[in-house]
Image (tube, helix red, strand yellow):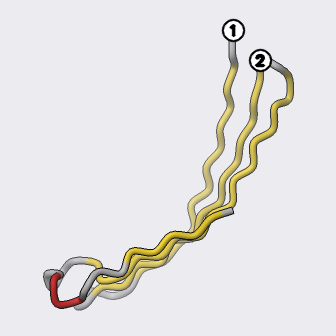
Amino acid sequence: IGYGIDDPVDGDMGPLSPIRNETYYVTTIWDVTKGFRVGFQVSYLKTAYAVLKDADGFIFQTQFMWKF
């Protein structure tokens, strides 16, 4: 589980640049066997802009790993 934030000084950013980014995430990894691993991550991202419309959304990622 994690959280990240990037909040630069607004005056240092250009009119189309993001002025704030936030990320929340949860990751789980399961070793099914010694040679096979499954992982899953869910992230929520939120970005604020000075001029453009703010944006947010979810990202879903999966991982399958075979070791041999």
Question: Height in image: 19 above or below 1?
Answer: below
Amino acid carrying label 2: it is: Gly
Q: Quadrant of the C terminus?
A: top right
Q: Is residue 17 left or right of residue 45?
A: left
The numbered mark at residue 35 is 2
User: Which residue is the extreme one toward the right?
Assistant: 33
- Residue displayed at 47% across by 78% down: 46
**Mark 1–mark 2 contact, CB under 8 Å?**
yes
Of the residues under marks 1 and 2, which one precedes in the sequence?
Answer: 2
- Residue displayed at 68% across by 31% down: 64
Quadrant location of residue 62?
top right
Task: Tell me residue 35's x, y (percent).
Answer: 77, 17
* CA neighbours of label 1 inside 10 A, class few (<14), some (14 to 19), many (20+): few
* CA neighbours of label 2 inside 10 A, class few (<14), some (14 to 19), many (20+): few
Disc 1 to disc 2, C-alpha distance: 7 Å
Q: Is residue 43 left or right of residue 22?
A: right
Q: Quadrant of the N terminus?
A: bottom right
Task: Tell me residue 29's x, y (percent).
Answer: 75, 42
Task: Tell me residue 45's x, y (percent).
Answer: 50, 71
User: Can you identify the residue that label 1 sits on?
Assistant: 68
Q: Secondary structure at mark 2?
A: loop
Question: Height in image: 14 above or below 62?
Answer: below
- Residue displayed at 30% across by 85% down: 49
Amino acid carrying label 1: it is: Phe
- Residue displayed at 61% across by 49% down: 61
